[in-house]
Image: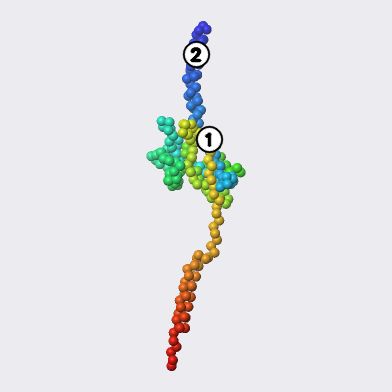
Amino acid sequence: MNKLKSMFSILMAFVLLAGWPTAIHAEETPESGSLVLTLTDDEDQPVVGGTITLTKVADFSEEDGNLTWKLLEAIDPQRNAVEAPQNRKTINEIKEAIKDADLENITVNVNQEGKAVFENLPLGLYLVTQQEPAETYNPITSFLIGPPEIDENGNRNYNLEALPKVEIRRPRKPNTGTQTNLPFYIGLLMTSLVLLVMALKLKKSPKTRI
């Protein structure tokens, strides 16, 4: 009887050990992640105010251990892969493609620490834009980012951080009218020179005696 119990215990232990890696793998593949953007100026000081908007443009896909992004069907019916997400040309093409697409936007306020926090973010690739910048600042440059990210060692990161730089909005110089009236002043100067030359010629010409 004891021998039977021992065999049963060994069998149960084997079953538990066999299922353990599966449980770990499931835990390592969550359905959502997070993204924290910290906006700073040229002096690395937090920029407070304004909003940040995320627009999901692609789904996460893994093939043979490689991470790929498949464009949403609303953007591309063929669902082609996004090549070079950090390339400026790619970003601009996606910005143009989503203008007529019916996509959901997620917008949050930038808090007092200069942070825009997105929690419980479904996995995918997102276009980051700023329609409403902080007062006296320009909008951030749009970029693509999204959980998960995979490093060179194959480790996945579902909680991402980004540090976009924000530039101060330079005030435009007031129009003093100098540039606008420049052709007028040049014309006036040329006319004056012509009249002066004519006056000198008349002065030098001999007088006619009667």
Q: Position of residue 141 (x, y in %)?
A: 50, 47
Which quadrant of the figure has residue 111? top right
- Give above or below for 122 relative to 167: above
The answer to the question of whether label 2 and label 1 lie on touching residues, with beta carbons closer than 8 A, is: no
Query: Which of the labelled discs sits on residue 10, or is there none?
Result: 2
Residue at x 56% of width, y 51% of height:
168
The kind of secondary structure element at disc 2 is helix
**Vertical arrangement, residue 179 with respect to residue 6, above or below:** below
Quarter in which the C terminus is drawn = bottom left
Query: From what the image shows, is residue 95 above or below residue 29?
Result: below
Identify the image's colour scheme: rainbow, by chain, secondary structure or one colour. Answer: rainbow
Residue in the foreground of this view, choosing between 203 and 25:
203
Residue drawn at 50 percent across, 24 percent down: 23
**Horizontal side of residue 82 vs 52, given as left or right:** left
Q: Earlier in the sequence, mark 2 or mark 1?
A: 2
Name the residue at the left extreme: 78
* Residue at (49% x, 45% y) in the render: 142
Which residue is disc 1 drawn over?
Answer: 159
Structural crowding at the residue carrying mark 2, measured as other residues with C-alpha within 10 Å and reported as few (<14), some (14–19) or many (≥20)? few
User: Do we see residue 30 in this rendering?
Assistant: yes
Residue type indicated by callout 2: Ile
Front one among 104 and 59:
59
Q: Please, what is the three-letter code of the amino acid marked with disc 1?
A: Asn
| Residue 94 visible here | no
Tell me the number on the disc at residue 98. none
Residue 71 on image: x %, y %: 42, 39
